[in-house]
Image (cartoon, grey):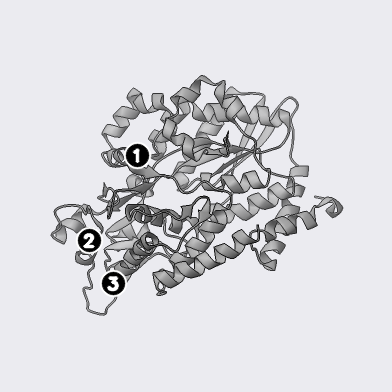
Amino acid sequence: MKTNLSHFPIEKLTQKLRIYNWSFPVLTICLICLIILFGCQNTTKKDNGVIHLTLWQGINPPVNRDVFNKLVDKFNQTHPNIYVESIFAGEPDQQLPKILTAVVGNVPPDILSFSPETTGQFVELGAIQPLENWLEKLPVKSEIPPNLFDELQLDGHIWSVPLYTSNLGIFYRPKLFQAAGITQTPETWSELRQAAKKLTIDRNGDNRPEQYGMLLPLGKGEWTVFSWFPFLWSAGGEVVTKNQPNLNNPEAIAALQFWQDLLLDGSAKLSAPERGYEEDDFIAGRVAMQITGPWTYITKSKVDYGVFPIPGNVERATATGTGNFYLMKTTPVREKAALKFLEYVLSAEFQTEWSIGTGFLPINLKAAQSKAYQEFASQKPELQVFLAQMPVAKSRPIIVGYSRLSDSLGRAIEASLLGESPQKALKAAQERLDLIWENE
């Protein structure tokens, strides 16, 4: 594989990535990624008459990824002139540097599956195509729930289409609740805290419980931020005011203090760093409660489990877990072919099979109303919890600069979970964001 380095936009890449406060080692890694991506693009095989498209995704757990890849294979079999290659690009936090490197290096994938909170960043880089004109002509548009469009739009344009939607709840082990004498699932923060205490068991008295009440995600990545947002909203708070970050407010402090209180009580266990979505401790009975959604492997395991809504404080709230597809800027021919695949993803056929196979809520109303999905949902009572929460589900801020906000917020949450006072952690995060916003 020969690569001509003279064509690499090294200076442009470095300038763009420094906007996101990346260190020199990270920049170096990105340059290496660019070389690999550029070289791989030059060696892509092209069959006569077949348009080869690359699709990057980070679908987890692997069983859900298998469902998706089988559906991609169906598309390829029914579209002989288009071949979509589904590539697992890593966890979302791992993907972002690769994506930005590929975009700035002009070697992006054709289709990208990613969270809607990054929309502003992709728009800022000029990496994605607006979709409203294309979507307006499709009959399937009327089959998409109207409330999902909040996560697709920015500055008057639709920038993505949904692959799935869902929201966060709290999974629990009924047998452990029964053994602890808990007969009702918590509905308030106070009840959740008391339940976590009762569910924490130190059998040998070594101050290292064999069973904790709850798992909290340790890390500064998006999973931690995502898991914390329902508590912010249930405290009646926000972290954006007039498109400006506003982290250091009483409601945010209260939400972060609640998480810290669970740790101070000794009734919450921290996950391994940046691994708060893994279910091993829950399945093994080392924790009795875990914040996650219906996509979790727990639903496919053999353990006893139930789900209850995120407990409220001032109000009830949860966070939507929506995964979107972006049409990357490439060439007119490739973009036209990619839109064929996106239309397939929105269809009732795709959404019915995908939702039944993964546990995500369908984003197509006909799929949700289909006999197959209704039969499936009737056998999965936990889905009713997530469906019932949809009216109080909110999306994380869709603003330019969300990645910087999330990074600073994640650092504050992590610092607080490791012992820093919530007030001090959020104050430091806000000061950091003030500097970033002033320099933009």
- Amino acid carrying mark 2 in the image: Ser
State the residue position of label 1: 390
Q: Are marks 2 and 1 in contact (CB under 8 Å)?
A: no
Among numbered discs 2 and 3, the one appearing first in the sequence: 2
Left or right position of 313 against 156? left
Q: Select label 1 or label 3 by which is in front.
A: 1
Residue 190 numbered tag: 2
Q: How many other residues sit within 10 Å of disc 1, few (<14), some (14-19) or many (≥20)?
A: some
Residue 327 image position (x, y, % from top left): 62, 36
Residue 266 numbered tag: 3
Q: Please, what secondary structure does the residue beneath circle 3 have? A: loop
Residue 408 image position (x, y, % from top left): 52, 63
Residue 198 image position (x, y, % from top left): 19, 65
Q: How many other residues sit within 10 Å of disc 2, few (<14), some (14-19) or many (≥20)?
A: some
Left or right position of 327 against 199? right
Among numbered discs 1 and 3, the one appearing first in the sequence: 3
- Amino acid carrying mark 3 in the image: Gly
